[in-house]
Amino acid sequence: MNRSICAFAMLICAAGCLSNVSAQDKLNANLVNKNLDDAVKQIKVLAKQSTEGMLPKTYDKGKNFDSETGWWTSGFYPGTLLYLYEHSGDTELLELAKQKLKLLEKEKLNTTTHDLGFMLYCSFGNAMRITGDTAAYREILLTGAESLATRYSPVTKAIRSWDFDNFPVIIDNMMNLEFLNSASRLSGDRRFYDISVTHANTTMKNHYRKDYSCYHVVDYNPKTGGIVKKKTNQGAFDESAWARGQAWGLYGYTMMYRDTKNKKYLSFAKKIAKYMLEHPNMPDDLIAYWDFDAPNLPEDSKYAKYRHYRDVSTASLTASALLEMSTMVKGKLSNYYLKTAETILYNLSTAKYTAEYGTNGGYLLKHSVGSIPHNSEVDVPLTYADYYYVEALLRYKDLIK
Ligand code: GLY
């Protein structure tokens, strides 16, 4: 969520990457501003189509689908409204966000999910950062962080993801650590930070393979901390590289370097980026397939017909993470991350992926995948694809100003 770029990193890359930015001719400040201005108009279409008392989630076959506040994606729509308010100063967006925040507040007491970072930090965290109103949001954020911390076990040295299986931990959970890091800074309570760092280290040790791809799920024995099984839930098969999972890890370890300054996280993020960007199945336009192994699925696979489905949410997340990474490294590598993010964002902004005004249920981007194994949200817009796309556009704007 924190899209501010460290001053030291800006100094490191200023000479190298900014000169290259001005040389590129595809993505530029004008196009980014146009995309953001168009997004402001389009999200007002979504606002009109969203059910009162609920949160936008997706759109399929002419129908908008909204969720209750307890669904993991509930924070992304208010978060996107707030980012677009930050861009435009349009107070209508702030008011729309505040209406949804009122509904969302009760989730601060929810101890049945690990997704509180997505739900509360992308929403209330952005609200506090952008409005500067600490008094309004501090208690909500700290109560939510306490709720998330109840899911940590010193035996597994991880935060529990789901309440089924033994003690499952999914790679997605790396994304909720930003919330704990911020709660530590806000409260001065180091416990949140220690949980976050321990979880990140456990995940680094147990989720990742030798090639720096990761499993989706590691199920632990809650009594011993031993591993029961490594598997997938949303990927093509247990040993495959589910694309969004790779992107959650990339973004998660980049964010952990930002918040801890521990170089091992940056070095890890670089290896994940290499795995993803150099993968033989990465399409030329860098909008990843839903699983890096999907194009190689055999004819008799139950998912064979989905071999070439893209997941735009993976692309948005990846672009946002790479932009931050470009500020953390120097020289050619910085330029490479920046150029790669530019290519992704440029391609996302073409008609192939960006919806025409008034279409797509009011969502910005088309062609994401929720879960093919569950036959759920296949080739549709998703609220989190839009959130990370807008975040990436704003990060890009910050970088080139
Ligand atoms: N966190 C759930 C997903 O990425 O689909």
Image (spheres, rainbow, N blue to C red):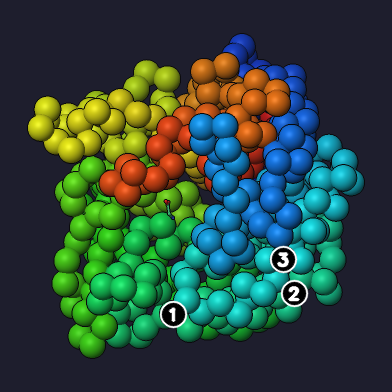
Label 1, residues with CA under 10 Å away: few <14, some 14-19, many ≥20? some
Q: Where's residue 230, x and y in %?
A: 19, 61
Depth order, front residue of 211/114: 114
Is residue 130 shown above or below 211? below
Amino acid found under the numbered disc labelled 1: Arg
Depth order, front residue of 229/155: 229
Amino acid found under the numbered disc labelled 3: Leu
Q: At 53% from the left edge and 23% from the top edge, which residue is drawn?
A: 353
Counting residues from the start of the chain, the first of labels 2 and 3 encountered is 3
Disc 1 versus disc 3: distance between alpha carbons?
A: 23 Å
Q: Secondary structure at mark 2?
A: helix
Amino acid found under the numbered disc labelled 2: Arg
Q: Which mark is residue 138?
A: 2
Circles 2 and 1: CB atoms closer than 8 Å? no
Residue 242 in the figure: left or right of residue 188: left
Counting residues from the start of the chain, the first of labels 2 and 1 encountered is 2
Q: Secondary structure at mark 1?
A: loop
Depth order, front residue of 122/68: 68
Residue 210 makes an appearance in the image:
no
Counting residues from the start of the chain, the first of labels 1 and 3 encountered is 3
Label 3, residues with CA under 10 Å away: few <14, some 14-19, many ≥20? some
Q: Secondary structure at mark 3?
A: helix
The quadrant where residue 134 appears: bottom right
Q: Where's residue 78, x and y in %?
A: 70, 53
Is residue 157 shown above or below 57? below
Q: At 57% from the left edge and 32% from the top edge, which residue is drawn?
A: 62
Depth order, front residue of 168/6: 168
Residue 326 in the figure: left or right of residue 376: right
Choose mark 2 or mark 1, whichever is in front: 1
Disc 3: which residue: 103
Q: At 52% from the left edge and 18% from the top edge, which residue is drawn?
A: 352
Disc 1: which residue: 151
